[in-house]
Image (spheres, rainbow, N blue to C red):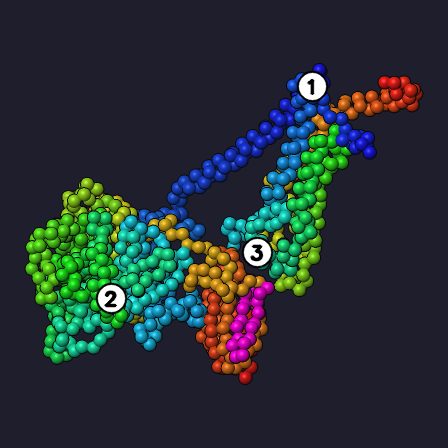
Amino acid sequence: MQRLSGYKLSAKAVVGILLVSVLAVLLLMSCQDQGQEGSAEESSAPAAVSGDAAAIAEARGLTPDDITAALKTYTPTGVHDEYIMFASGGHGGQVYVIGMPSMRIIKQIAVFTPEPWQGYGYGAEGTMQTLAGGFVGDNEITWGDTHHPALSETAGDYDGEWLFINDKANARVATIDLRDFETKQIVKNPIALSDHGGTFATPNTDWVVEGGQYAAPLGWEYSSLDNYAEDYRGMVTFWKFDRESGRLVPEESFAMELPPYWQDLCDAGKNVSEGWIFCNSFNTEMATGGVEDGNPPFEAGASQRDMDYMHIINLDKAVEVAQAGNTVEVQGFPVISLDTAIEEGLLYFVPEPKSPHGVDITPGGEFMVVSGKLDPHVTIYSFEKVQEAIAAGDWQTDDYGVPILNLDNVMEAQVELGLGPLHTQFDDKGYAYTSLFLEPSVARWSLGGDYADLNEDPEWSLVSKVTVHYNVGHIAAAEGDTVSPDGKYLVSMNKWAIDRFNNVGPLLPQNFQLIDINEPGDNLQLLYDMPIPDGEPHYAQIIKADKLDPWEVYPEVGWNPHTQSPDPNATQIGEERVERDGNNVEIFMTAIRSHFTPEHVEIKQGDHVIWHITNVEQTYDATHGFTIPLYNINMSIEPGETATFEFDATEDGVFSYYCTEFCSALHLEMTGYMLIEP
Amino acid sequence: MSNVWQSIVGPRAPADVDDEKRREYRLPSIFLGLAALSLIISIFLPYWNLTLEAPQYPKGLHVQTYVNRLEGDVQEIDGLNHYIGMRPLEEAAQLERSLSIILISVTALLVVSAIFIHTKWVVLLALPALLYPILFVADMYFWLRSFGQNLDPTAALSNYIEPFVPTFLGEGLIGQFRTISSFGAGYYLACLASVLILVGLYFHRRAYKPLVDATQEKAQGSGTQDSGSSGATGEV
């Protein structure tokens, strides 16, 4: 019995010891966690400003405002930005990716123009196909004039998945995949040679809007300017977007014929106005220029009338009409004729102040804001009143029979802002912001309706202005054209820089100015100047950085970024080979730090060479480049990517190919010889 | 034959005992069973973890060594190792890894079978599992040493890095890399299995030794009778 109780004791003791050990480990782990959290909190506490800082500020001549601006924008090493701005690169043909508030350029996305860093347009098959999608007939177009980026939206809010942008010069639209920030598609507008009013995504990105600009006969036809009113036409194209394939689908897209006024910018309705599209226009005078013949130049001829026409388009109904086949074919592309648009009630006009540039829809979709750039006001229209006016059927018509609603019946308010108002953005506090080109400044003004309760300023009134440098065009506020703007930051995209930066010769950069719009009332602070040394950026969109979730490396080794799927020619380590079939030579190569396999490639003059390279790395940032002299081959092969290029071995000789991205300590040794035997 | 079998398997626990006595017989079974379970679970957990830290790798490089495979940044570490001429990690302990699941399963089964052996032979069945953590460490060290000592003399950095023995536990330094190696949960479970076996064997001895002794005494008693007066036994 005594021995038995001895067992019981020891059994309990053992179980107890085990339990205590487990608890101790758990306790230790939780303590460690708390310790880490505690230290993180400590390190995030603001550091005291030292005497040194004051001395530096004095030596550099910094004012207290300069110091707060610096504190609001300075981003220490390793710290990421809160917002990402996608800005058009203008006639550089590219898109800029900029972190905010640091205003650091993080990436340039090649879109319409070949770009060597990304290996875009220098042999890599997918990029060549993308660029070829934008060729006009047999003409290889190798640049673009990017204007208005549009992030894809879900329920009217940016979803961070896709980006679209148009090329004004050649009426093209590109699709960029935000999983790898690369351009996947360029489509050429089948009926117009140039555009302007694109791109704008509908609230769920079902449609991407591409509005026209300079009227011309549809379908790239010829007609004398004497026949302007009869043969020249404006247009708006609705590209169907398929999220599954990540492509615009020309077969399901259509356009609408418009009078030969110069359609300018559009915006998609949202919330209450979802399903409607709004575009403004100028040159309703239908001036045809010819200053050399004694005619008024366009700048005067197109500015005679006090009013132009905002176009109000019922997209939902237009889709039904197009799907019912009630269209005409232009270059094989379905177009709703102007007559059909009028008959079916798809198109209405409203007078808008002289030569407007931009129509912007308030976050709730209730109001359309238009600035006539030759009128000191912004004019605000009520969507509800527009619907009432359409229902009432009380209108006049223009020469083409398009109904023109009575301005007095649909206008909600007018606010006098100043000289040269252009584009409007919104924040979360019931304010709108409008760029004033001539002053030049950005005006903050208060909205009315449901927005009036969001701030203390009287509704529909000018609140404050901040001077910008110089000649502002578009402005972009954080998520400022969505259903839920964030406020906080606004970027003034200035056309002229003049004295803002060091003199670099007669061609100057553009100037992006970051403005703090966080405080209500008369508190707008200019924070930072950022030069953009490329084409003239037009519009930008600013998305909360945490909505973007791009890949660090491609999902599998042997990935084709063009199809976003495994590449049939992917080559793993050990599978490298050279296959010859007559005059066709096919090379399957791998790249890894710090060598290509194979390092010798022997071919004969006259061979046709197909070359696949797989970067078998799966390490973040372990990109390899590849270039061959003379043959104009240059590629960027990111971790996991398989890239393919082809060329005819027309020139014999000894060619050393090498890695163009400094990949490792033995990067210079990452090379090989291609021997082309005569 | 059945006598030999009997002498190995040993006596069965009597059926008609009170609760306390029954617990006495159950304890070794529970501990040995838990030991076998620990061993089996350890197959699914890493035995040895290696972390490499360098400025270029803000998140570090991590390898988890399981009994049958390597996981983590193996490719990247192999890529780095090729500069100093170290063989790819996958070439290490190939035989051991290919047999590991079977051997550990058999070891665990032996421990389970030990539950039904109530003599001192139980130690023989439990011995592989008992010694397994030591064998693992010995094998691991052999391979670390083998890899560190046999560097390809033609490798790019062979002039810079002399043959070395990678740090088995704790921190080390190789090139710009700080290495941190430690045992993983799997190894600790294997060690726990050894401890459980020891405890189990202790209870085993406490529970069954008296029975075995009693049987032997009885056998000896009857044996004496046998040799002394077989006729009497025959009558019984």
Look at the image and say whether residue A396 sits in the magenta stretch: no
Q: Which mark is residue B75?
A: 3
Q: Residues within 10 Å of mark 1 (few under 14, many from 20)?
A: few
The amino acid at mark 2 is: Pro
Report the mark closest to the observer, 2 or 3: 2
Q: Amino acid at mark 1?
A: Asp
Q: Earlier in the sequence, mark 3 or mark 1?
A: 1
| In-front residue for pair B103/A536 | B103
Residue span colored magenta = A574-596
Q: Amino acid at mark 3?
A: Gln
Left or right: B117 in relation to A276: right
Q: Is residue B181 visible?
A: no
> Neighbour class for label 2 at 10 Å: few (<14), some, many (≥20)?
many
Which residue carries the number 2 mark? A334
Residue A454 position within the rendered picture, expressed as x and y whole percent measured from the top left? 21, 42
Side of A179 where B37 appears, left or right:
right
Please indicate, yes or no, whether residue A635 appears anywhere in the rendered image. Answer: yes
Which image quadrant for residue B105?
top right
Outermost residue to the bottom: A678
Q: Are marks 2 and 3 on the same chain?
A: no
How far apart marks 3 and 1 lie (CA) works out to 62 Å
Residue at horizontal 28%, vertical 58%? A207
- The residue carrying mark 1 is B16
| Numbered disc in front, either 1 or 2 | 1
Closer to the camera in the image, A67 or B140: B140
User: Regarding mark 3 in the picture, which secondary structure is present there?
Assistant: helix
Residue at the location (30% across, 64% down)? A251
Gap between marks 2 and 3, in whole Å? 53 Å
Residue depicted at 46% across the width and 38% down the height: A37
